[in-house]
Amino acid sequence: MMDNSAENLYSLAHQAAQASRLNVSLALGENNRVLIHHKKLEPDQPFFEKEINKEFQAKVIASNAARLVKGIPIKDIPLEVDNKNKSVSDILTDLDNFQSISKETENKKMSSSAKEIDEKRIKELTNYICKKLKDIEKNNI
């Protein structure tokens, strides 16, 4: 039996996936519980659920949500940061995947306010990824 907060998070994540043009939602609940939900799944059966305690885990989970949209294999969620195996090309690949998803949605009919929100979010994510790339380059030197 689920508690009310978990049940509510499942419901909200499912509703968001139903409303999404990409059919996927990413939800964050109490205690850093993260859900990835898909439109075709039952409300109480998310695609992915995990409590995270590290920022880098959240990045991998968000990347997995994009991979679900693209229909490509998801990545494991690491327990610790492994900068030795983390390459700039991996991050650039994730950025390329995100940009191709953005272009696909851009080609669909959208209201001007939805386009503004999407464009703003794309800029925010691009700035975030560029900052992370710089951090990785600093740590590898």
Image: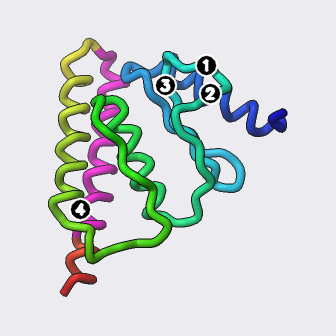
Q: Which three-letter amino acid code belongs to the residue tagged 4?
A: Cys
Circle 3 SS class: strand
Point out the frontmost of discs 4 and 2. 2
- Which residue, given by chain and number where applicable, does mark 1 sit on? 42
Mark on residue 34? Answer: none
Q: How far is mark 1 from mark 2, CA to CA? A: 5 Å
Mark on residue 130? Answer: 4
- Which residue, given by chain and number where applicable, does mark 3 sit on? 38
The percent position of residue 90, horizontal first and vertical second, equals 21, 58
Q: How far is mark 3 from mark 1, CA to CA? A: 9 Å
Q: How far is mark 4 from mark 2, CA to CA? A: 34 Å
Point out the frontmost of discs 1 and 4. 1
Q: Which three-letter amino acid code belongs to the residue tagged 1?
A: Glu
Q: How far is mark 3 from mark 4, CA to CA? A: 28 Å
Lower position in the chain sequence, tag 1 or tag 4? 1
Q: Which three-letter amino acid code belongs to the residue tagged 3?
A: His
The percent position of residue 43, horizontal first and vertical second, equals 64, 22
Instruction: Please say whether residue 123 is one of the residues in the magenta stretch.
Output: yes
- Which residue, given by chain and number where applicable, does mark 2 sit on? 45
Lower position in the chain sequence, tag 3 or tag 2? 3
Range of residues picked out in magenta: 110-133
Residue drawn at (71%, 50%) of the image: 30
In this rendering, position of residue 85 left or right of residue 75: left
For label 4, the crowd category at 10 Å Cα-Cα, with few meaning under 14, some 14 to 19 and many 20 or more, is some
